[in-house]
Image (cartoon, grey):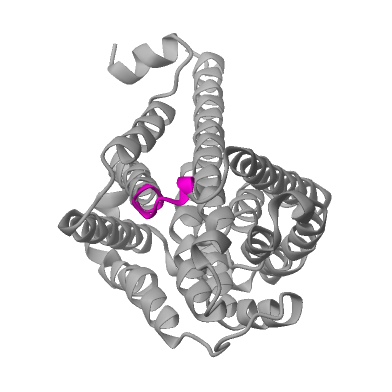
Amino acid sequence: MTFGERLKSYGFDLYVVLLLATVGLATILPARGAFVGIVGVATDAGIALLFFLYGARLDTSSIIAGISNWRLQLMVLATTFVVFPVIGLIMGKLAEPWLGPEVTVGLVYLSLLPSTVQSSIAFTSIAQGNVPAAVCAASASNLLGVFLTPVLVGVLLHAGGNNGFDGKAIIDIGEQILLPFVVGQLARPFVGGWIKSHPKLTRVVDRGSILLIVYSAFSAGVVAGIWSQVDRTALVLIVVLDTLMLAIALLFTRGVGRLARLSYEDSMVLLFCGSKKSLASGLPMANILFVGRPVGIIVLPLMLFHQIQLFVCAVIAQRQGHRLMMEARVRQETRLEEKPA
């Protein structure tokens, strides 16, 4: 019996244990100084390898199908840039008397951001969802978010400062996500078969990249000392509101997926791409959009939300993937039993 199987026999999941251990490590030994650069390089390398593997595994027809699934893509974008902002505005209005104006602005700002790219696609893959559609949805969300988020902030929050568009974000997305994916597609005739015959490699890179993202993001929060910038009562309230916002988004995307009768694979895309917000896009945008204001306080709800969404969605993805694997195993055993001798 492996260590992971032994943990499951006691009711624990190895991946959840690793997530908790990563959070604990970042809290006790956060990345500092030169080590931040090393962690950043490792994270970027892991993400690049992950999308190379995705590209090498996926046939071109599946990618075209993902792009052409316009109904699913519109659902993800509407959830990200319409439904989420409505939730954020309502919560901000209700919480302002207890949190104050700056944290309230941060809560609304969080709701206006695009979806994550790396973790959304990785979670979709872990849950055995439609990865090509997830690549399209998450990339489109970030590319449009470069333009839509500043406009929404200007209209809904009346932020000062330069509301210009950050062209570097588009270049970064292209280099980190699309380029490795395209290279994987080009290499598919040579390595695609081998990669498909070793699915464990992709699973390890999936989970490893998420753990690196969690450690990097949580380390940044610890080093920045955001936990000491607000009192405990406000901190608890922010965590509660962030958790409630994520829960509403998850329930909404799950419900809409069922009402729209999406396939299981597409429903996982809507669930993971539609329910998350990007720290990587949110932090640099905040420095531009909130010049002269306490950015550290404004982005606090985002930083906490980022940790919560990674942990919750990792657990959901892991359980969904495990459930499908068990169902497939049962079906295979049933077919073997029914096969005549």
Number of numbered labels in the structure image: 0
On screen, residue 92 above or below 112: above
Residue ID at (69%, 59%): 104
- Give percent across and percent down for residue 110: 62, 62
- Give percent across and percent down for residue 114: 58, 68
On screen, residue 194 above or below 6: below
> Is the N terminus in the top left, top right, bottom left or bottom right quadrant?
top left
Quarter location, residue 67: bottom right
Quarter location, residue 106: bottom right
On screen, residue 130 above or below 141: above
Nearer to me, 185 or 84? 84
Residue ID at (54%, 31%): 319
Nearer to me, 12 or 267? 12
What is the magenta segment's predominant secondary structure? Answer: helix
* Residue 221: in magenta span: yes
Nearer to me, 120 or 189? 120
* Residue 80: in magenta span: no
Classify residue 34 as left or right of residue 318. left
Q: Is residue 61 visible?
A: no
- Give percent across and percent down for residue 87: 77, 57
Residue ID at (58%, 38%): 232
- Give percent across and percent down for residue 316: 56, 36
Q: Is residue 281 visible?
A: yes
Residue ID at (58%, 54%): 301
The magenta segment: 220-228
Nearer to me, 48 or 38? 38
